[in-house]
Image (spheres, rainbow, N blue to C red):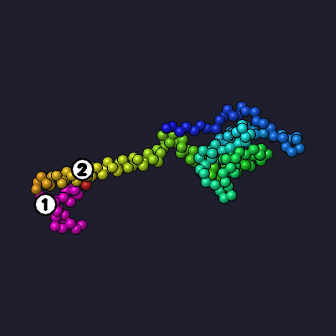
Amino acid sequence: MDLFISEPVSTAKKIKYPAQVTANGKLKRSFNASYYGKHPWLEYSVQDDSVYCFYCRHFGGTSNLPGQRYGSRPFIDVGVRRWKDISNFIEKHTRSDRHKDSAVSLMKFKAIQTKELQPIASVLMTDRDNEIKENREHVKALLKVTALLGRLGTAFRGHDKTESSTNKGNFVETCNLLAD
Ligand SMILES: [Zn+2]
């Protein structure tokens, strides 16, 4: 199954952002599309008239910071729409550890998609495959030595198997020879 994640929608720039009316009914604010260029992670929700973080929504994990719970994490599960302070909110979010981790995770995900990086499962599989292959070769070699010594009718075991021994027996000596 291919998992495809697209970047935040750039066509959102063409959207007309609703203006908010302040308490005195005069000053109107709305989201400004110029933020897109500065912050590629920013995504605007027409439904909520608020902004979210594309990176953290997809790659931010589920852990919460102290005092946070689902539905209270700005830019992740609750949109931010305080346009007056949006620059500060954006800067603070950009500097957060969670956001930095999410950005790294997204980069890794993209690298896997473009085959620059192998998924960890596939690396583990390859290691395991190689290990199995190697073990098979070892067993094959041991069986060949056993068959040869059996055919020659020679003794398998030696009398002195200590590390310093110059003759540890036909089986051990032949195996050592193959292992070199
Ligand atoms: Zn983020």
- Viewed as shown, does residue 80 lie left or right of 139? right
Q: Nearer the viewer, residue 62 or 43?
A: 62
Residue 124 falls left or right of residue 145: right
Disc 2 on helix, strand or loop?
helix
Task: Residue type at mark 2: give it.
Answer: Lys
Q: Nearer the viewer, residue 116 or 102?
A: 102
Are the residues at dot 1 and dot 2 in contact (C-beta closer than 8 Å)? Answer: no
Identify which residue is drawn at 64% across, 38% down. Answer: 8
- Check mark 2 vs ligand 1: CB closer than 8 Å? yes or no: no
Q: Quadrant of residue 13?
A: top right
Mark 1 vs ligand 1: CB under 8 Å? Answer: no
Label 2: which residue? 140
Q: CA distance from mark 1 to mark 2?
A: 20 Å
Residue 91 pos. (x, y %): 70, 49
Q: Please, which residue is most extreme toward the front here? A: 70
Give left or right: position of 72 versus 25: left
User: The magenta stretch spans which residues?
Assistant: 154-177
Instruction: Name the secondary structure under disc 1.
Output: loop
139 on left or right of 57: left
* Residue at 41% across, 47% down: 125
Q: Which mark is residue 155?
A: 1
User: Nearer the N terminus, badge 1 or badge 2?
Assistant: 2
Q: Name the magenta segment's main secondary structure.
A: loop
Residue positioned 59% across, 47% down in the render: 59
